[in-house]
Image (tube, grey):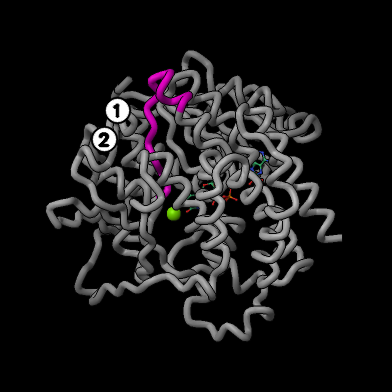
Amino acid sequence: MTSLHHTLTILGATGSIGVSTLDVVARYPERFSVYALTGASQIDKLFEQSLQFKPRYAVVLDDLAAESLRARLHAAGSQTEVRCGEAALIEVSTAPEVTAVMAAIVGAAGMPPTLAAARAGKRVLLANKETLVLAGQLFMDAVNASGAELLPIDSEHNAIFQVLPRAHREHPYAQTLQDVGVRRILLTASGGPFRTRPIETFDAITPAEAVKHPKWSMGRKISVDSASLMNKGLEVIEARWLFNARLDEISVVVHPQSIVHSMVEYTDGSVLAQLGEPDMRTPIAYGLAYPERVDAGVRALDLFAAGRLDFEAPDYDRFPCLRLAFDALRAGGAAPAVLNAANEIAVAAFLDGKLPFNGIPVLIEAVLADCVTDCRAETLADLLAADTLARECATRRLT
Ligand code: NDP
Ligand code: MG
C-alpha cells in the first residue's frame, strides 16, 4: 500500500536510528504522525520524545520503567498511554491504524515485532538487519505472503534498492537478478577504524577506540560490528535475502570515504551507484516518503571537498568475522542465527572489558562449531531456540 500520509510506529525510538527518524518526521507533520514510540533503558529520552510527538502509546520493556514513565507523563498532562513487554511491541507494530513501522531495535530482540509488522502487511522500514540474519527465509516469506512493503534503511541496501530496476526492488522474488540484467551487487564497506592499524596491536584495542567510527555516528553494537567487519558480514546476509541474490552475486568493496553507499553491476557493463553524505537521514527519508523524495535535512554532497574516491579488496585475514559470515550463509540452516547470537554475546563481552577485540571471531567460530549441528531452522521456534542455545554456549565459554 502506498499512501502519502503515514501513521508510524518507531521501534527503538531512543536509539541512533530512532532519533534520526524523528528528526525527519518532525519536518513533515502533515505527512507523518506517530502512533507509538518504544525504548528500553533511556526512559528520560522516551519521556521527552513522547511530549514532543504525542504518540498514542509509549512502550518500554519492564513494569518498573512503565510505572515511572506513566507517572511522569500523567503529571505533564500527556495523553500517551504506556505499555510494556514484547506483546506490547507486537501490538503497536500490527495495530490497524499503523501504516508503517520503523524497525530500529538493536539485535535479535528486534526480530519478533519486525516479523509481526511484515505479517500484518505494513510498510516495514528495516534498519534491524539482525532480523534477516536470524530469520531471513521466514521474514521474506511473510513479506511475500502479506504484500508488506519492505524498504531497506541500512545505507548500503538502501543504495542498492535505489539503483535496482523498480520491478526487482519491489518484487525481488518474482524473478532472479539475472532476469533483470544484474550481474553483481557491490556492497561497499568503510573498512572501519582499524583498516590500517598494525594487526599485531589488535589485542590492545579498547572499546572506546572500537566505537569511534571514522565516518558514521551509530549505536555501540553496530559500531563494534563495523570495526570487526562483522557488520559487513551481516549485511551480505541481509542483501542475500532482500534482493534474492546468490552468494556469488554479492561482492564486498572497501571504500574508506563512505560516499558511494553501494553499487549494482549490470550485464551490459554499466555500474550504477548511489552517493551521498554519510547521514542516515537520507535512507530514512527515502523509506518514509517512497516513492517520492523529500528534503531530509542532509547537506548536499560536495564532490570537490571529497576530492577522491578509493576502492580496495577486503582483507579477510585482518577481519575473520567477514569470512565467518560468508561461511555461515553458505552453510545455511541455523548457522546465521547462531553466528548472530554468538556475535551479540561477544560484542557485549568486549564492551564490558571481558573479551579482547581479537577474541570476538574466536568465540563466534567456537560457538558455531559447538552448536550448529544441534539446531533446526524450519520454524520460528527453531530459530529462537538456536538463538538461545548459541547465547548459552557463548556465555559458558566466557566464564
Ligand atoms: P542504538 O543502540 O542506538 O539503539 C537501539 C534501540 O533499541 C534503542 O532505542 C534501545 O533502547 C532499543 N533496545 C535495545 N535493546 C532492546 C531490547 N532488548 N528490546 C527492545 N528495545 C531495545 O542502535 P542503532 O540505532 O545504531 O541501531 C539500531 C538498528 O539499526 C541495529 O539493528 C543496527 O544494526 C541498525 N542500523 C543502524 C545504523 C546506524 O547508523 N545507527 C545503520 C544501519 C543499520 P534504549 O536506548 O532506550 O535502551
Ligand atoms: Mg550499513
Type of amino acid under label 1: Ala
Secondary structure at badge 2 equals helix
Q: Residue 17 has which mark?
A: none
The part of the image, by quadrant, that contains residue 76 is: top right
Residue 349 percent across, percent down from the top left: 75, 61
For residue 124, side relative to residue 230 (left or right): left
Q: Earlier in the sequence, mark 1 or mark 2?
A: 2
User: Is residue 271 toward the left or the right of residue 249 in the image?
Assistant: left
For the point 74% across and 30% down, which residue is it?
A: 66
Using the image, tell me which numbered label, if any, was put on residue 174. 1
**Residue 123 drawn at (x, y percent):** 40, 27
Number of marks present in the image shown: 2
**Span of residues in magenta:** 141-154
Q: Nearer the viewer, residue 113 or 62?
A: 113
Q: Which residue matches tag 2?
A: 168
The residue depicted at 66 percent of the width and 23 percent of the height is: 88
